[in-house]
Amino acid sequence: MTTSTFETIGKPPVDQFKVKPNLDPDNVGEFDWEQVYSELDWLPGGGLNKAHEAIDRHANGPRRDKIAMIWEGKNGEREDYTFGQMKELTDRFAGALQNLGIETGDRVFLFLDRIPELYIAFFGILKAGAVVGPLFSAFGPDPVRDRLEDSGAKILVTQPDLRRKVAEILSQLPALEHTIIINKNGRDESALEAGDLDYDAQMEAAPSDFSIVNTSQYDYSIMHYTSGTTGKPKGAVHRHQACVQQYATGKWALDLHEDDIYWCTADPGWVTGTSYGMMAPWTNGVTQLIYEGGFRASAWFEQIQKHKVTVWYTAPTAIRMLMKAGVAVPHRYDLSSLRFSASVGEPLNPEAVVWGEEAIGMPFHDNWWQTETGAIMCANYAAMPIKPGSMGRPIPGVELGIVDDDFNAVPAGEDGNLVVRPNWPGMFHAYWENSTMYNSRFKKGWYITGDRARVDEDGYFWFVGRADDVINTAGHLVGPFEVESALIEHPDVAEAGVIGKPDPIAMEIVKAFVSLNDGVEESTALRNDIMRFAREKLSTMVAPREIEFVPSLPKTRSGKIMRRLLKARELGLPEGDTSTLEDDD
Ligand code: AMP
C-alpha cells in the first residue's frame, strides 16, 4: 500500500460518534499499563482469568440481566443470553470438563460453527484452567489433525456434521481422550458415534457448585495456529494477561461504550474472532451480536438494521465484496444505528475507507495487529483524523519501530521491517513446543512482525507488504508449505510450489505451480481433481484457487522451491538475482 492519494479525513465532529470518544490520542500524557490493570476484577488471592473478566464480573454485578449475546442462527433462529445465564452455563461446562479429568494447562479444542455453545464451551474451558484451541469449521481433516496432534489436545468439542468430516483422523490421535458432540437443537438425527460424549448429558451431570480455577495472569489461556514460511502452522500461545489489552483496545480502537450493540464478523477460528469476537466486547460489558450465517451483502446489512448494531468490526475483503454489490444495497436498509466502523486483517484500500462514508455514513477505521500480538497495536481512533490507506498510530503503551535488516531505525517515509518493543500485555508467550521458532522472532530488543511498513512524519504507519512468503488471502494467512504438502499427496503430483497471486477482492489468492509424475498427461479433468483433493484435505479457503502445470519447478541446490522466482514470473517482473537458483538461500 502506498501513501494515499486521498486527503486526510479531518478529525470528525464528536457527535458523529454519538458519544464522547474514549481516547484522545493527542492527550494521553504519561501512560502506564498499571492504570488499566487496576480496572480489572482480579480473583481473590490475585489470580486473573479471562472468563471471569468477560463473564463473571458482570454476572456478579449490575449487568447480571444485561444481554451479553444476541445470537441469530443461519436459519433465522434467535437466542439471547444474559451475562447471568452465560455464567451459569460456562460454570456447568467447566464442571463437566473437571468431571472428565481436565486440569490446569490441558488443551481442549473446539471445532464448531458459530453457535452459542461455542462461546459457552470457550469460557468453560478457561474457567477450568485449561487452554482453549478454537478451530475454523471450514477446515478439512488435515489441518484439524495437525493441530490436535501438535497441541496434544485431550478433548475435542464438535458437532455431528463436522465430526463426520474428520472421522478418519480421530483414531490417529493418541492424546485425544474424548469427543464431545453438541447437537444444536437436535439439528442432526444420527448425532453420536460410538465412544462420543453428548454435550447435553455432560452439562446435566455437571456439579452445580463449580468455582473458577484461580489461574494466574501468566497461565496459558488460548492457542491459535498461524502460518509461517516454513513448516506446518505453529500454535501461538497467549496468557490470561492478554485480556488487559483486549479490554483497553475495545475502548480505544473500537470506541466501545455501555449501550453499544457490537458486531464482529470474524469467526473464532481466527484470532480476531476471539480477541474481538469475545474478549473485547465482553470485558467491556457490551452486548454483542453473533451471526451464524455466512457472507451476503443484503443479509449483513439486514443484521445491522434488525439488531440496531452501533459498532461494527469487519475486514477488507468483506468491505470490497460489499463495494462490488454497490451502494444501492446499503441504501435499502436503515443503518442509522451505526456510529463507528473498523477493519482489520489486510491492507484497507483508501477507496474502501472513503466508500464507507457514502455507503454507511462513516469511514472505516483501519487497525493493525496479528495473531502473535493478541490485540490491536495500531489504530485510527475515533477521535483522530483518518489517513485513508494508513493503519493509524500505535496504541498507548505500545512502541512500534521501522528498522532495516540490521535493526537500525530507518527515517520517516522509508520502507523497513515493522518491529515491536517486547512485553506489551497481549504478547504471545510461546509457539507451542517450538522455542527455536519463538526465539527467532525476537532480536536486538525487538519482536519481528514479518511485515514491512513505513511511518510518516505524523507518526501514522503504512503497510507495505509481507517480508516472507506467507500468503494473505481474504485476511487469512496461509503458509505455502502446508498447501504444497497437501498437493504432493495427490498420486499424480510430483512437486508443487505455492504463491500468493494478487486479486482485486481477496488481496491474494493461493496459486499453485504443479509438476506431474512421469507419464501423467496434463488435462482440465486432472487439474479439477487436484483442486478438489486439496479442498477436501485443507479447506476451500486454504486450497489453491488456480493451478498451473509446469514441467519442473525452480529449486535451490538443496532442493528448496524458489517461490520468489515463481512469483516474479507470475507478475511478469524481472526475476532479479538468480545466482542462488542452484545454491542454498
Ligand atoms: P493474522 O496473524 O492471521 O491475524 O494475520 C496478521 C497479518 O495480517 C499481519 O502480520 C499483516 O500481514 C496482515 N494485517 C493485519 N492487519 C492489517 C492491516 N490493517 N493492514 C495491512 N495488513 C494487515
Image (cartoon, helix red, strand yellow):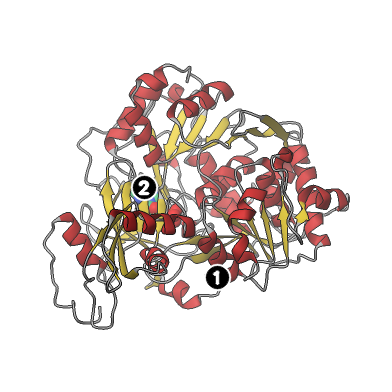
Q: Give the alpha-carbon distance from disc 1 to disc 2, as whole Å.
A: 25 Å
Residue at x 86% of width, y 48% of height: 204
The answer to whether the residue bearing label 1 lies less than 8 angstroms from the nearest atom of ligand 1 is no
On screen, residue 107 above or below 359? below
Q: Secondary structure at mark 1?
A: loop
Kindly identify which residue carries mark 1: 432
Tag 2: residue type? Answer: Glu
Relative placement, left or right, of 157 versus 10 is right
Residue 550 image point, x, y percent: 22, 65
Kindly identify which residue carries mark 2: 346
Q: Residues within 10 Å of mark 1 (few under 14, many from 20)?
A: some
Of mark 1 and mark 2, the one earlier in the sequence is: 2
Q: Is residue 380 visible to the viewer in this orientation of the structure?
A: no
Judging depth in this view, the residue of 520 and 264 nearest the camera is 520
Judging depth in this view, the residue of 202 and 9 nearest the camera is 202
Residue 355 picture quarter: top left
Residue 333 image point, x, y percent: 46, 18
Residue at x 81% of width, y 56% of height: 96
Most extreme residue toward the left is 574
Residue 197 image point, x, y percent: 77, 56
Tag 1: residue type? Answer: Trp
